Amino acid sequence: MQYRTLGRTGVQVSTLVLGAMNFGAIGRTTQDEATAIVDAALEAGINLIDTADMYGKGESEEMVGKAIAGRRDDIVLATKASMPMDGERNHQGSSRRWLVTELDNSLRRLGVDHVDLYQIHRWDPSTSDEETLSALTDLQRSGKIRYFGSSTFPAYRLVQAQWAARDGRLSRYVTEQPSYSILQRGIETHVLPVTEQYGLGVLAWSPLASGWLSGAIREGRDVTTNRSTLMPERFDTTIPSNRARLDAVEQLADVADQAGLTMIQLALGFVTAHPAVTSAIIGPRTLDHLHAQLAAADTTLPADVLDAVDAIVPPGLDLAPHEKFDTPPSLLDPSLRRR
């Protein structure tokens, strides 16, 4: 396992991060299975575990808490908040009112007295940066969180938050967690230059592109992955963007074969090759999935392989731009672009 410094924090983290979204109902993973995955990940050298309050409405946090009991101090523990937790309108977002309450809920579910990294799961356009950053700064000073970061923020919001922290003499985001894979490279044009400029650690989620790069999805095969069951529209190859992804996957499979790599090694090695990226988040649902992904822990792609990838999916291109989660609200809601 390789290790890198998380932004400018001085904290050393593994280049593969164990993501716990599949723990519980989402991935149909039992507590015993989740504990076995955590055990194997830690034994392999992974030292950062990432979860969120909304994964299974708290179920993932509870399962992570049970799995790490007795070895908390050996783990860099990260969780997230701001996504809706129920039908109550104020049980979401990044207001002080909600973050203070929900962090306590997360700590209770995790069975710990602090988390190392607390992340705002999505930018909340209804809450000012000053409101959120002042709340996070106070939570940091209270000892309940060590650092805080953002997730899937547009580049301009990352910049604005850095300015707001400076002007308000508040602590600042030290990490960003964006979606990044060979098939979704849009952040190379805007987000990654900003994270490099401000020294943010980058924890990339969905490096296997929701399973497209796992090796399980190929031309002529039925798509039977767990994710395709949950979101079939993302794998319907009659849709042009999905057809483009499948065409790219077939070409990438040839590149992997010629380099003596699995598709997973190619996909994870590509993400961790970018100098702005600290780690890639893997989200295994089973031990077999974990072991297949751990095989990429020491993968370093040579220049000719990276050049071959660029020729298939050009730098900065998203093959499925409609699946991005950092679109400005006014592009999604017509009322926000009408006077």
Image: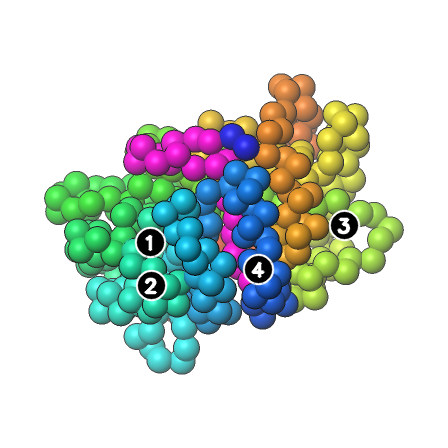
Residue at 41% over, 72% down:
85
Sequence-wise first label, 1 or 3: 1
First in residue order: circle 4 vs circle 3: 4
Taking the spot 41% from the left edge, 46% from the top edge, the residue there is 75
Q: Distance from label 4 to label 3 (Cα)?
A: 25 Å
Q: Which mark is residue 115?
A: 1
| Mark 2–mark 1 distance (CA, rounded to whole Å) | 7 Å
Pointer 4 with pointer 3, Cβ within 8 A: no
Q: How far apart are marks 1 and 3 (CA)?
A: 36 Å
Residue assigned mark 2: 107
Quarter of the figure with the C terminus: bottom left
In primary-sequence order, the first of circles 2 and 3 is 2
**Label 2: element kind:** helix
- Is residue 10 one of those drawn in magenta? yes
Residue stretch in magenta: 3-23
Q: Does residue 8 lie above or below 216 as drawn?
A: above
Disc 3 target residue: 217
Residue depicted at 66% across the width and 56% down the height: 286
| Residue pointed to by mark 4 | 34
Is the residue marked by circle 2 packed among few (<14), some (14-19), or many (20+) residues within 10 Å? many
Q: Can residue 154 be seen in this view?
A: no
Q: Where is residue 13 in the image (x, y as percent from the top left)?
A: 43, 37
| Element type where label 1 sits in the image | strand
User: Nearest the camera: 85 or 245?
Assistant: 85
Circle 1 crowding by C-alpha within 10 Å: few under 14, some 14–19, many from 20: many
Residue at image point 47% right, 27% down: 275
- What kind of residue is marked 2? Leu
Camera-near label (2 vs 3) is 2
